[in-house]
Amino acid sequence: MALDEIKIGGLGASRKRVEDNRFIRGKGNYVDDVVLPGMLHMEILRSPLAHARIKSIDVSGAWAIPGVRLVLTGEMMAARNLAWMPTLSYDTQAVLATDKVRFQGQEVACVIADDPYVAKDGCEAIVVDYEPLPPIVNPTQAMAPDAPLIRDDKVNQVDNKVFDWEVGDKEGTDRAFAEADVVSEIDMHYPRSHPSPIEACGSIADFDRSTSKLTVYMTTQAPHIIRAAVSLVAEIPEHMIRIIAPDLGGGFGNKVPVYPGYVASILASILTERPVKWIEDKSGNLISTGFGRDVYLKGQVAMRNDGKILGVRMHTESDHGAFFSDAQPSKFKIGLMHSAFACYDIPNAHLTATGVYTNKAPGGVAYRCSFRVTEAMYFQERMIQAAADDLGMDQAEFRRVNLVRDDDFPHRTPFGFLTDSGQYEKCLDIGLEAIGYADFKQEQEEARKRGRLLGIGISTMTEPLGAGNSREYDILGIKMFDSAELRVHMTGKAILRTGAKTQGQGHETTWAQIVAHELGIPADDIVVEEGDTDTAPFGMGTYASRSTPVAGAAVAMVSRKIRAKARKIAAHLLEVSEEDVEWELGRFYVRGAQDRGVSIQECAMAAYSNVPDGMEPGLENNAYYDPPNLTWPFACYIAKVEVDPETGVWDVLKMVAVDDCGVRINPMIVEGQIMGGLTEAYAMANMQFITFDEDGNCIGSNYMDYLLPTAWETPGFELHEVVTPCPHHPIGAKGIGECATVGGPAAFVNAVMDALKHTGVRNIDMPLLPDRVYGALTTGSDISGMPPVKTEA
Amino acid sequence: MTLFEEVPVTTTDEIPVRRVEMRVNGETRAANIEPRLLLAHLLRNGLQLTGTHTGCDTTNCGACTVLFDGQPVKSCTVFAVQADGHDITTVEGLATASELHPIQEGFKDEHGLQCGFCTPGMMLSAKALLDENPNPTEDDVRWALSGNLCRCTGYQNIVKAVLWAAEKLRHDAPADAPADDGGEA
């Protein structure tokens, strides 16, 4: 008899997580928990200024402290050709500053000592003489003709521009705008934010002189990319590098780039011949490591009077900080910004993008999103609402008019992606029903008469998750496929390894469920390992919601290879030809004689004890999976809010999420991902941003200034689902980890703007802090979030 | 037991060393430490109780929460010397050898954790709440946990986990002492 798939923890089972067993006991193994014999500790001295020339560095005070073993400066790095390193976007980044500091918090020196406290003492004792230079804190200032040059280290760099990039059909779009009845325009800023996993970054480098092997424990979401990068930067042969990403205390994109601390700890270990541990403090993490967002938009929508959108124009200016160290696919300079409007049937679109250097921390990482998709969908849904308002059309109806219909797939998006499936209107309808949209207009009207401000905000979007395919997606030329390796032992138990790296997503639980689905081996009989480059197959890691679409697909494909071999073994055991063998979950049987069968476990035993003549023994294989397309989950998020006109504070009365991520491997984990994503969406709409003063001081360098939502203010969420299986994924799954973070912010902001609609206010830049909302309410003016610049006294 | 004596990493003439003694998870532990050593670091590095995590260093995130005489404190801003003579409970003290604490079970059952980094602190704040209030409302739980940040879950399942544990603890608690009516068992 076929097995009960749910009972064996297969597809669709809300299986309890196996990784929890260690986490709830405090037995997780995070980087800071790793202790190696003779280990030294490293601390980084950071720049207090945003832009300054280094006149001198005096490290003698640090050397004088007992217990200090090494002091590293930019000059020492330069002597070893390590003062600069390549970024993941074909730029260079200072490891330790030599000539200038270019943002507040930049790494200037490192002290390595017997004890972390002593290493900190050492940093305190270093004296750096800086000559301050004028700081640049926003793109407008950066592109002014007389702006000081930030990247004077780069040959041929004459201004502060990183790139100009464009996509779409300019002529067609111009024609659409010429033919439009109404053109809606809106400018806005998606503010700089920080992914801020609770665990900051860190590494332990352990160079063994006797074997020439370098082992690095590291907080990385992409250990194999790091191995390649370290090999290139430090000129250590790749086979002599082992990167181990142990348990990660969250990542959210923050742990994708290569950071100076990693490189410095490696050099320190090589020089001291001892393991060197670097554990970043929270402030260092917030001011120096990969931020997200920081993009300005000029958006235009051309429409007919009946609501049909004829074309859109977008121009973005992105603030990349001092070094272009985004982790983006190399073809797409502003990530997948051009995935905007993918769920709408719009014939013409044109996007121009300019990236600039400023005196801020580098990054532009995909903070819980697939390469700038978060900005794309926020801009899209804010433009959609403004357009509906400008047209005087109901916001839900306006979407309905323009959403791609269920029978119109595959569909070419306005900027040229190909979407393959979706039931967009169904999602919208479920969301509208759940929020009580039909009665809302009247409720809003009556509330307003009593001085209460209610609003509903909708956000509908489909986003591209799961890069590659490798034709179009690569990082530094490394193609974006992924991998899985499965070994089935003779007793039918198995070990699975993939090139992804879980940071809380639950791969140890869900990957086993895919194997259980494909092979009928109970999930409890499969152990999953990731993150060790010496044992895991090569993969591009976990970010951009690519694990399930790519590595998860590889898990299914390797299981199928195992099943194909097991089928041959089964035919041998059953003494029939392979064509006469049928499969049902967990066993093969003889066609027409269902009771004559062998289990997958019996096949496994035979693979090691009784293989047919000519067959290699053993039951293991690997699969490298290059997806034919991205996966396109769809979602509709609807928030209902009340704004207090006396204070500008807004409360979420209800938040509804309708997600279509295709087949759900583990519904419990999927819902956990959605709720986590919604919370980050709420955070960005409400409180979470990193800004700077006119001197380039980072406002948000700790959790007292950088506000993250707690259990107290985070609203409850109501979740709904639609299932449209992904047509090309082996098990019909799509990415989900980031959908709510991507689509959610616009729902909250649109809701507040809906509540303020009668005032004529069209935009308040995120976060919608009480003073901004109150300011908009009292002045009737839009509120910009652009940081202030220094004016001549 | 003494700590750091065999690894005298920072004992220079200028740095004084103090002996402290405290009960940690029911066991008496002693250590010779620098007065500036934080409790979180004593627990993690000295006593190898690495379930106590340090997240923010500024008393905001709560990953380092431990119970200090039963009250939740952020051990990253408590000096170890302040714990001299006191009773400390860390996540390692929640389960017995054979049994998980109901809060631990609740976190697993309700999917109250993802990356697991905030979980030990979160569970200890929850324990302090349930020790004081065995029958909390959702708002009570949210308020009690508002000093502990989680970036993964959105809190909804954490709240459910704590309510699950409260229910289980109430159910498992010994029934009220029988009324003294002389009845036969």
Image: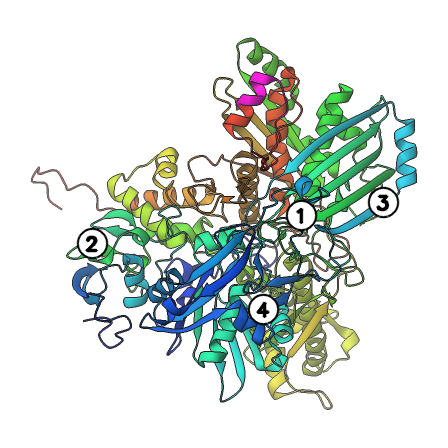
User: Which amino acid type corresponds to the residue marked 2 in the rendered image?
Assistant: Gln
Q: Position of residue A556 (x, y in %)?
A: 67, 65
**Is the residue marked by circle 4 packed among few (<14), some (14-19), or many (20+) residues within 10 Å?**
many
In percent of width and height, residue A312 lies at: 81, 35
Residue A168 circle label: 3
Asked if marks 3 and 2 touch (Cβ < 8 Å), the reply is no
Question: Residue A781 magenta-drawn?
Answer: yes
Q: Residue at x 54, y 48 (%)?
A: A194
Disc 3: host chain? A
Q: Nearer the viewer, residue A87 or A327?
A: A87
Tell if the residue under mark 1 belongs to the same chain as the one under mark 3: yes
Q: Which residue is mark 1?
A: A661
The amino acid type of the residue labelled 4 equals Ala
Q: Magenta part of the protein: which range? A: A774-782
Q: Nearer the viewer, mark 4 or mark 1?
A: 4
Residue at image mark 2: B82
Residue A83: which disc? Answer: 4
| Chain letter belonging to callout 2 | B
Q: Residue at x 70, y 71 (%)?
A: A623
Label 2 element class = helix
Which residue is at 33% across, 73% downward?
A67
| Inter-mark Cα distance, 4 to 3 | 39 Å
Q: Nearer the viewer, mark 4 or mark 3?
A: 4
Residue A591 visible in the current orientation: yes
Amino acid type indicated by mark 1 = Cys
- Does residue A271 sit above or below A378 in this rendering? below
What crowding class fits label 3: few (fewer than 14 Cα within 10 Å), some (14-19), or many (20 or more)?
some
Mark 1 vs mark 3, CA separation in Å: 28 Å
